[in-house]
Amino acid sequence: MFAADQASRGLGIELLKTGDGSAVLRMAVTASMVNGHGIAHGGFVFLLADTAFACACNSHGPVTLAAGADITFVAPTREGDVLEATAEERTRYGRSGVYDVTVRRGDEVIAEFRGRSRTLGRRAAEAEERS
């Protein structure tokens, strides 16, 4: 799934590790990601966390999408910062799941993200693969 993710790869996001319900990704904050306050736009931090979430919830095999997500920004980031997002599965039940992602700059927590996933039914997954 990550190999086909043009948006994330185009921003320089690297997949460092993936496992059963987990993933670790890295992204460097570039000049084009900085807003008018001189800090990274929160949307880019969210995108990194969301990509880690996607890699973790799709690690089981079936096509799985976000049903919802929220993020708490803990500290600002600036151009040149290297961020690492670690996603961990908390629970799966039926076709749904809950995943937590921590975004760090070194040892410092930058953001906490919680994603809710939904695995597509067979017909929906087949239609998604055809599009």
Image: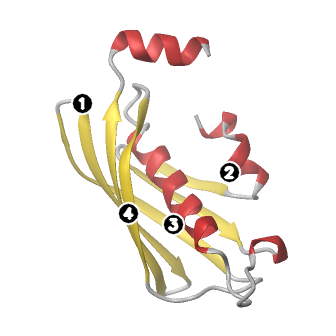
State the quadrant of the C terminus.
top right
Residue type, mark 2 in image: Ser
Q: What coloring was used for the rendering?
A: secondary structure
Query: Residue tagged by mark 1?
Result: 95
Name the residue rendered at 70%, 86% in the picture. 78
State the quadrant of the N terminus.
top right
Residue type, mark 3 in image: Ala
Q: Mark 2 vs mark 3: give the one in front.
A: 2
Q: Earlier in the sequence, mark 2 or mark 1?
A: 2
Mark 4 vs 1: CB contact within 8 A: no
Q: Is residue 107 above or below residue 53?
A: below
Query: Residue tagged by mark 2?
Result: 8
Q: Residue 85 has which mark?
A: 3
Name the residue rendered at 32%, 54% in the picture. 99
Query: Residue tagged by mark 4?
Result: 70
Q: Is residue 76 above or below residue 59?
A: below
Mark 2 vs 4: CB contact within 8 A: no
Residue type, mark 1 in image: Arg
